[in-house]
Image (spheres, rainbow, N blue to C red):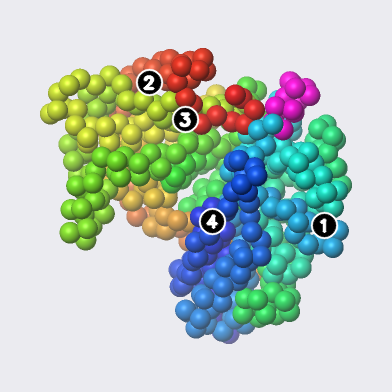
Amino acid sequence: MAQQYLMAVDAGTGSVRAVLFDTEGKQLGCVQQEWTHAEDPRFPGSMDFDWVHNWELASGCIKGVLAETGIDPKDIAAVSTTCMREGIVLYDADGKEIWACANVDARSNDEVGELIRMNPELEKEIYSLSGETYALGALPRILWVKNKMPEIYEKTAMVGMFNDWLIYKLTGVLAVEPSNGSTTGIFNLETRAWDPSIMRKVGLKDDIFPPAAECGQVIGQVNEKGAADTGLAVGTKVVTGGGDAQLGCVGVGVVDPSQAAIFGGSFWQYEFNTPNPKTDEKCRVRVNCHAVPGMWQYEALAFKPGLTMRWYRDAFCQEEVRKAAELGTDPYQLMNEEAAKIPAGCYGMMCTFSDVMNFIAWRHAAPTFTNFDFDPEKFNKYTFYRAIMENTAMIAKGHMELVHEATGNRPSEVVFAGGASKGDIWCQIVSDVLGLPVKVPVVREATALGAAILAGYGVGIYKDISEASRRLVKWAKVYEPNMENHAVYNEMFATWRKVYDAQLALSDEGTTRYMWVAPGLQ
């Protein structure tokens, strides 16, 4: 029998890629193309999704990885897809795309205000059903289309997500799976399916929903058009995938109840698995369907840690950038070596960037460094750099405590993946702040592996998603907490919360500018 392969197509915020794996989870090839989502100059905050050009890029990646690896397309057992969450595509009655926006599209500020004025308690009611508020969901965006582009709204016959759109382009079959579908705020968490009553509550069409198909199901086969566009073989089985964070969890082995992962990139995500769809009474934390059937996830987001680090490097560490270029290394490595010499707690200095999540009233204080002295031996640029890392770990601790309040459960260890896990120092700080072992997987960018696991499960190569995930995920390193440092950070956390509350009050009263504020809250 010929060797079989699995393909993942991963549509991220900044790029799309096709990745080929063998059935043991080994990555054999990857072709990636960067893409951008342009703002419509008429609508500030908009982030349009160009479905024509972006399909050319996606299909080009598939052709590219087939050429790069030289495998026979007939030996691909299955394809699955994953993507940035929250982005939506609207289709007309003929199945043609007529409008689409990417994940952090922020054009619907007026519509959030309209929804809040319509019924101040409705957002909490919708959250209790869907696990979503207006901050990231599809309701304000579809209402925006109704208000600002009524001709498009009138033609709208279906709504879907980007991972399902990729499958639609390959197969001609449109169905929405629950892990990404639930990020619309129009899914019922308990049933893991669309809830048309939510649309009726806000005066929107309640009949624009394609079927819901559970993650890991064979949904169709590559058709003639899909094969012509991509080079895949006609008849190749295509399996429903999932949202990037959920499939990232599958790709790092976070598939069982009470397991947790932190994905550290431009934004940080704390994901905690739970076997029931209960939401938080105070509406502070997001709840999504996991890509593992019968599992849900509490999700808490930290805004912009990776972007903050990039800003700090570019603004203050030009010498490290120059020296790293000479040495052929990463400037962060040079910065980390110096930051490791600073003691835990940064001599009492701390900073405020992202806040612990408060989904129903989501906002972040003005960025601030505070509680430092004019002593260059102690308070140099590496102290400030380390303070950013400590601040982000404090947010992770706040998220862990928040989910504990909502569920009564804490993890016994945390998986840490993504770009932030590449250096020892941030991994150790996270371990010390949380007081838990931190496990770093070999495959740190694991979303595509998660999609490949679902593809293999769908066609029977793997009998169980969780078992396959546990078997295929390998560990690069485990960081054990330094409990002396943990005690320092525990004391610091209480102070940091007070400092953050004070800084947030300044932004709330308009004295300082929010770092970010959810639509409709200003």
Dot placed on the residue nearer the N-terminal end, 3 or 4: 4
Which residue in the protein does label 3 denote? 515
Dot placed on the residue nearer the N-terminal end, 3 or 2: 2
Residue 346 locus on image (x, y percent): 24, 27
Dot 1 lies on which element?
Answer: loop
Dot 2 lies on which element?
Answer: helix
Task: Magenta stretch: give its range.
Answer: 111-123
Badge 3 vs badge 2, beta-carbon distance below 8 Å: no
**As shown in the figure, which amino acid type bears the numbered disc 4?**
Thr
Which residue in the protein does label 1 denote? 92
Which residue in the protein does label 4 denote? 36
Is residue 133 in view from this perspective?
Answer: yes
Dot 4 lies on which element?
Answer: loop
Which residue in the protein does label 2 denote? 496
Q: Residue at x 38, y 33 (%)?
A: 393
**As shown in the figure, which amino acid type bears the numbered disc 3?**
Met
Q: Residue at x 85, y 52 (%)?
A: 155
Total marks placed: 4
Dot 3 lies on which element?
Answer: loop
Residue 135 locus on image (x, y percent): 63, 34
* Picture quadrant where residue 1 is located: bottom right
**As shown in the figure, which amino acid type bears the numbered disc 2?**
Trp
Is residue 467 in view from this perspective?
Answer: no
